[in-house]
Image (cartoon, helix red, strand yellow):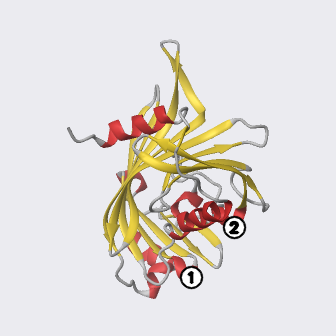
Amino acid sequence: MKKTFKNILISLFIASGVLSPLCAQVTADMAKQILKLSDKNTNYSGTDFKADYTIVTDKPGSGKSVTSAVMYRRDSASMFTIVIKAPESDKGKGYVQFDKNIWFYDPRDKQFTYTSAKNKFQNSCLNNSDLVPQTISDDYDIKEFKEVKLGKFDCIYYELSASKKGVDYPIVKLWVSKDDGLIRKKEDYSLSGQLLRTTAIPSYQKVENRFVPGGMLVVDNLRGTKIDGKMQYEKTQITIANVSFQKQSNVVYSKKFLEEMSD
């Protein structure tokens, strides 16, 4: 029987406590190269990227909220634009990044407000920085690595510590599938070692020889509610569909485009 997306996510989270070593040995140089490949797989330089994002955030005790958006990225120039399509109350809002700055646009007052890569995206468990190419191999040092099994995936497990200032999290644990360099799971920690956030990426879609997550689940391990004696954390599930790598007009990556899309 084919596993559902939900079942695969559950298996990844259950497997987080089981680090079963594999038989083959990966050298330190190989581990570095696989980590670099994991970054490369998130970067779509040389083309533009466009896709529909459905973002479902579940806040225990408060219900779910669903956000639909269109993402445009030009990674070679570190630019992106996000246009919110739903819910109706947020329709026309958006984000644009250029010149290393991120601006949020609200059509109600027709104002742009500066925001940070570390800020939450639309009050979800996502950071703005999660929506752009990752630079983990440049921003972190490998403290430990080993070959492990994560569910059905043969992975390299990394323990990483920040080597640069300004990163979202000082300590990261990462599971990267060995054969293709795709990030399967990520845990973000505080400097004191407290688990802050967990991300699972069980499925990818291959479009024009590039890998794009099909679905992601992000759990905020700090924000939650105790229900029937059990702690339930806030979580956000992301689905990415209708992926295109066709070139977009330069105006897409501008404040003017957001203003026109909200009219």
Residue 221, image x, y percentages: 59, 34
| Residue 32 visible in this rendered orientation of the protein | yes
- Where the N terminus falls, by quadrant? top left
> Residue 248: x and y, percent?
39, 83
Q: Position of residue 171 (x, y in %)?
A: 71, 48
Residue beneath disc 1: 77
Question: Seen from this angle, which residue lies furthest left?
Answer: 1
Q: Is residue 115 visible?
A: no
**Along the viewing direction, whichever of 124 and 131 lies nearer the viewer:** 131
Quarter residue 194 falls in: top right
Residue at x 59% of width, y 60% of height: 129
Q: Name the residue type under label 1.
A: Ala
Q: Position of residue 255 (x, y in %)?
A: 52, 77
- Residue at x-position 52% and y-position 77%: 75
At x 68%, y 54%, the residue is 168
- Specify few, some or many for label 1: CA neighbours under 10 Å numbering under 14, 14-19, or 20 or more: few
Q: Are marks 1 and 2 in contact (CB under 8 Å)?
A: no
Q: Residue at x 48, y 42 (%)?
A: 149
Split into 4 quadrants, where in the image is the C terminus? bottom left
Which comes sooner in the sequence, label 1 or label 2? 1
Three-letter amino acid code of the residue under disc 2: Asp
Q: Which mark is residue 191?
A: none
Crowd band around label 2 with a 10 angstrom C-alpha radius: few (<14), some (14–19), many (20+): few
Question: As drawn, is 116 to the left or to the right of 254?
Answer: right
What is the distance, in whole Å, between disc 1 and disc 2 at their CAs?
Answer: 18 Å
Depth order, front residue of 149/14: 149
Q: 232 and 82: which one is in front?
A: 232
Q: Secondary structure at mark 1?
A: helix
**46, above or below 14, in the image:** below
* Kind of element beneath mark 2: helix
On residue 138, the disc is: 2
